[in-house]
Image (tube, rainbow, N blue to C red):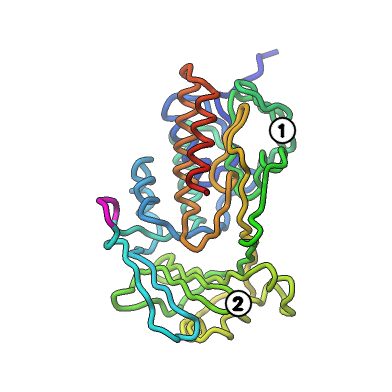
Amino acid sequence: MPPETIRDCLVVGAGPAGSAAALEMARAGLDVLVIDRGEFPRFRIGESFLPRTKRAFRRLGVLDRCLALPHARKVGVEITLGDWRHGPQRYFFRDVYGDGDKETFNMARVHLDAMMMQAARDAGAEVRTSCAINEITQLADGDVRVQTDAGPVRARWMIDASGQATAVGRMLGQRRYHSFLRNVAYFEHFENVIRPSGPAANCFGLTIADEGWFWMIPLDDRRTSVGFVARESLHRSLDVPAERRFRWAVERTPVLRERMANAVGPEENRVIADFTYRCDPFSGPGHFLIGDAAAFLDPVWSTGLTLGLLGAEQAANSVIRMSQGGSAATERARHNAWTKRITD
C-alpha cells in the first residue's frame, strides 16, 4: 500500500487570497493543495479595488493577466448625500502622498477569481473545486488532518482562506461580531446606470442615505455593480421582501432614482450579510487565517481584497520560512501581530 501523501500546505478556499497564497508557496517549491467547496466560474461580491491592490497584483506577477480581463479604471471616490443636499465631494488617488499607484481598477469577481485560481495552478499548486471540508480532525504544527468530500488530507500546515465560511474560526468558536457594524447588503449588476461624470468619471460612487448607504462600482464599459447597505435593525423590521429591498431603497433616494432611471437589470436583488467580525487569534498550531476567514471589516472603503492579498503574502511566507527550518512560534506571533494591527 503506498504511503499517505503529506502536503507541505493545505489551502482552504480558492478565491483570490487562497490562490495568491498557493501561488507564492508553489513558486517556492512547496507541495500545495487548494480545496474549495464551490465551483468556478462563480459570482462573488467585492469588486472595488484600491491602488495597493494593484501593487499586490504586480508583486504577485499577475497584473498583466488582470488588465487583460474586462475591467473599469478607478481614479478615486465621489461621495454624495442621497437627496443632493450638498454637491458631491470627490477624492482622487492622485492627491495621496507617496510614490505608490495613483489609480487602480474595478472588476467583476467572476473573472478575477477564475484567473487567480488558474495562476495558482500554473505555478504548480493542485486545485480541487467542489471539494468541501467535512471535519478538521487535527491542528498541530507539522501535522494537520482534515476530512473532505474527496477523502482525508494531511498537510504540515494549513492556510484558511475560506472567506465568511471561516472554517477554522467556526470550528474553534473564535468568530466575534462587532456589536454595531451588523449590516445587510442588497445588490445586483445593471447596464445603463448613469455614472459620475466630468472630473469624477471613473470614480467609485458612494451615496449616503438616512437608511444606509449605496455603492456604485463600474465593472467594465457597460455593467455597474450597485448595492444598498442597511443596518440589521432595518433588515429585521422592513415589511418588504428581501429580494425587493434594493428597488425600495432606490425609490426613496433622489440620487439613485436619477442614476438608475434607465438602468437595465434584474428586478430582484441578491442579499448578503456583511456583519463585521474577527476570528482572533489569527493563527495557531498548524494554521493561519487570512482574508475574510480572519476578519471582515465594514466594506465602505473597499479594503477586503487588499487585506486578503496582503494576508496571503504574510501567511505564505511564514509557511515557506517554517519549511526551511524557521520557528513556528515566531511565525505565528508575526502573523497574529500583523493581522491584529491592520484589523484594529
Which residue is nearer to you in this view: 179 or 206?
179
Residues at marks 1 and 2 touching, judged by CB atoms closer than 8 Å? no
Q: Amino acid at mark 1?
A: Ile
Label 1 and label 2: CA atoms lie apart by: 41 Å
Which residue is nearer to you in this view: 232 or 36?
232
Residue 276, quarter of picture: bottom right
The answer to whether residue 115 is left or right of residue 186 is: left
- 14 is higher (above) or lower (below) than 188: above
Q: In this view of the protein, can residue 2 be seen by the observer?
A: yes
Instruction: Name the quadrant of the N terminus.
Output: top right
The reply to whether the magenta stretch includes residue 252 is: no
Identify the main secondary structure in magenta.
loop
Whole-percent x, y for residue 311 in the image:
48, 41
The answer to whether residue 61 is left or right of residue 185 is: left
Whole-percent x, y for residue 210 in the image:
57, 79
Which residues, given as a range, are shown in magenta?
Answer: 97-101
Residue 138, quarter of picture: top right
Q: In this view of the protein, can residue 128 be seen by the observer?
A: no
Q: Secondary structure at mark 2?
A: loop
The reply to whether the magenta stretch includes residue 98 is: yes
Residue at which label 2 appears: 211
Residue at which label 1 appears: 136
The answer to whether residue 48 is left or right of residue 129 is: left
Q: Residues within 10 Å of mark 2 (few under 14, many from 20)?
A: some
Which residue occupies 44% across, 43% down? 310
Residue 266, quarter of picture: bottom right
Q: Amino acid at mark 2?
A: Glu
